[in-house]
Image (tube, rainbow, N blue to C red):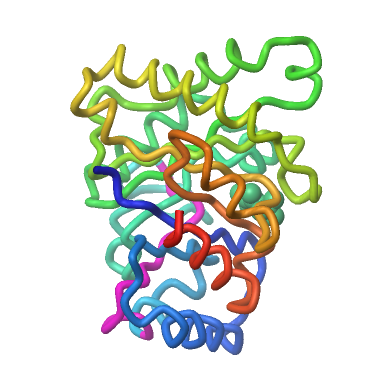
Amino acid sequence: MRRKLAAGNWKMNGRLADLDQLDRIMAACPAPAADLLLCLPATLIHPAAARVADHALRIGAQDCHQAGAGAHTGDIAAGQLMDAGASAVILGHSERRADHQEDSATVRAKAEAAQAAGLIGVICLGETLAERDAGHTLEVIGAQLDASVPDSATGAVTVIAYEPVWAIGTGRIATTEQIAEVHGFLRARLIARFGAATGGAIRLLYGGSVKPDNAAQIFAVTDVDGALVGGASLTADDFCPIIAALEAS
Ligand code: PEP
């Protein structure tokens, strides 16, 4: 019932010349059995969106401001991302929570702005290693979920990405048991808040060092509807096998 989603996050990487990777992904996946999304630096959104116009591959952004317009130098409104050709935006990535002191209330406001502009919000949650080691993982994740996800969330416009901070860019992945525990917890909490239909329709992605050689085992976990992929989304050589593993799951 939930369509799988392979989402990439290029972070602060990529120039115009790197958009040939999109051509290679489209050629490798002419009719994908999963939704495909690449969240690019803002500078690449417009040319990338034009490039994928005839394909199912969609282009997303990595952040938006919570206001619709105004005196916010350097920020970008959700409506401007939509105007540039984005169809989704990552919100509350742990790097933004850490580097820009974004709290969950801000993430929620951004998710509301994204939804109002017609963008899918990919809302990120994740515990630090210290929080996991202290046994606080579910408490932290539950609090982030409650405070970051707007009441207006639906399966069509909201995606949740569970990304343990200690697994992002480290080459270290959560065990399938750890992923199953958190995703099962998230699913139950979404259903408790939004009801079975909406809570059961919101997709749950895992993120954190997903690579071609570990993707299949992650996608076999119940309630994993796809992945948010950083480093391995930068090249078609790495991203295409992850898409293939998701399609086969
Ligand atoms: C991410 O950027 O969200 C991420 C999960 O990165 P990586 O796959 O490189 O760990």
Q: Position of residue 136 (x, y in %)?
A: 68, 11
**Which residue appears at 80% of the width and 48% of the height?**
170
Seen from the viewer's position, the closer of residues 21 and 66 is 21
What residue range appears in magenta?
51-65
**Which residue appears at 32% of the width and 40% of the height?**
158
**Which residue appears at 49% of the width and 65% of the height?**
243
In the image, residue 111 sits, relative to residue 245, either above or below, namely above
Across the whole image, how many numbered discs are drawn on residues? Answer: 0
In the image, residue 82 sits, relative to residue 32, either above or below, namely above
Image quadrant of residue 231?
bottom right
In the image, residue 158 sits, relative to residue 81, either above or below, namely above
Q: Position of residue 237 (x, y in %)?
A: 64, 78
Horizontal side of residue 156 vs 63, given as left or right:
left
Horizontal side of residue 246 vs 141, given as left or right:
left
Examine the structure image and report whether residue 214 is included in the region drawn in magenta: no
Image quadrant of residue 187?
top left
